[in-house]
Image: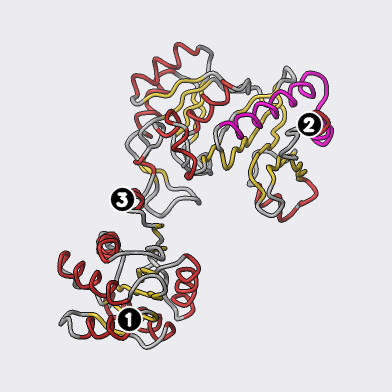
Amino acid sequence: MNLHEFQAKQLFSRYGIPTPHGQVVTSGAQARQAAEQLGGESWVVKAQVHSGGRGKAGGVRIIDTLDGVADTAYDLLGRRLVTHQTLRQGLPINQVLVEQPSDIQRELYLAVLVDRISQKIVFMVSAQGGMEIEEVAESQPEAILNLFINPIVGLQAYQCRRAAFFLGLTGDAFKQLQTVMQGLYHLFTENDVSLVEINPLVVTGQNALLAVDAKLNLDDNAVFRHAELAAMFDPAQEDEAEVVAQQHGLNYISLDGEVACMVNGAGLAMATMDLIQKEGGQPANFLDVGGGTTSERVAQAFKLILSDDKVKSILVNIFGGIVRCDLIAEGIIQAAKEVGLSLPVIVRLEGTNAELGRQLLSQSGMSIRVAQDLTDAARQSVLAAQETQS
């Protein structure tokens, strides 16, 4: 679960991590009022969406008049912001954050995440703040310091000093880094966070540290323990189909392709998507209905797929280990009847009662093709999508 920048900064304040003064607003008039209350001669207006790269996409602007702040907020609110991290339709801007500008002398990078290999929390530190950390890792890996935290003793003072030396900090900023890192560590562990990123963490003209930006992701499996944080969920920032999928226990992610997939098992789903691409198509989604799925869940999955107007064909790939293939077939037929299926559906069934499932599909009288193997299914689904588009 992702938080907005302003929500992450609210959490930062509780843990002693300094951020610029600002107010979140939902109208141009509120933005002007916020700027008046903040004072100063210029302000930063920042679109609140769950995506990085907002500045490059025009979602972060520096304005030097009160009328300009109101006009900018009016211009941003209600639009959809498209960045390199969003789908082509972008994300809706329903709130903007108005902040005082910062006196930036240096830009640093600081993040905390779980390293799956070492099974430890790791701090990532770099003096190359303001840049995409992936670019830095590829072109200058020596510019990133990784500090692995022993879960028994937690973050140690010497690790904070090591980070400060690595960043070349001195004086107050050197001392303040330990406070910031300890605050981030406690925020991370106490709230079941999976990623927190400050890019940039700036050194001001007064040699103080300030978290100018904030990205925070929560562990979905632990959100139930944090009612206050769960209430911060913004469904408008999520794909509507993905929100519905969560409610029905389905693992669904929208993509930009034309061949929809419905598979039981994440690994099998990935292999199916790879084969679609190998055959010259593009997957429209990732959809794992689970190993112990039911016909009702399959029917719901079909409705999700058909709610996407980009879809031109549907590939169903089921291996019946726990689940029976005849039940899957019944779910497919049920869903097809409920939604008035018009798109071509290619089904590959293997495993428990697979032959019975294939017979049910073949005798359904509907536009459902039964494939002999996965490669054949992928090839048929790509050709069917091309025929539908033409």
* Label 2 secondary element: loop
Q: State which quadrant residue 192 falls in.
A: top right
Which of the two discs, 1 and 2, sits closer to the camera?
Answer: 1
User: Of 74 and 185, which appears nearest the observer?
Assistant: 185
Q: Within 10 angstroms of label 1, few (less than 14), some, or many (20 or more) residues? A: some
Disc 2 residue type? Gln
Q: Quadrant of the C terminus?
A: bottom left
Q: Kindly identify the residue that appears in the image at 15 percent across and 69 percent down.
A: 337
Residue 387 numbered tag: none
Report which quarter residue 148 is drawn in.
top right
Q: Main secondary structure of the magenta part?
A: helix
Q: Which mark is residue 156?
A: 2
Disc 1: which residue: 353
- Which residue is labeled 3 in the image? 244
- In three-dimensional space, the C-alpha distance between marks 1 and 2, rounded to whole angstroms, equals 58 Å
Residue at the image point whose x is 44% and y is 39% from the top: 49
Task: Please check the rendered image and state whether residue 162 is part of the magenta-colored stretch, yes or no.
Answer: yes
Mark 1: secondary structure: loop
Pointer 2 local density, CA inside 10 Å: few below 14, some 14–19, many at least 20: few
Q: Which residues are magenta?
A: 161-190
Which residue is at a point 33% across and 82% down the rendered structure image?
354
- Viewer-nearest of labels 3 and 1? 1
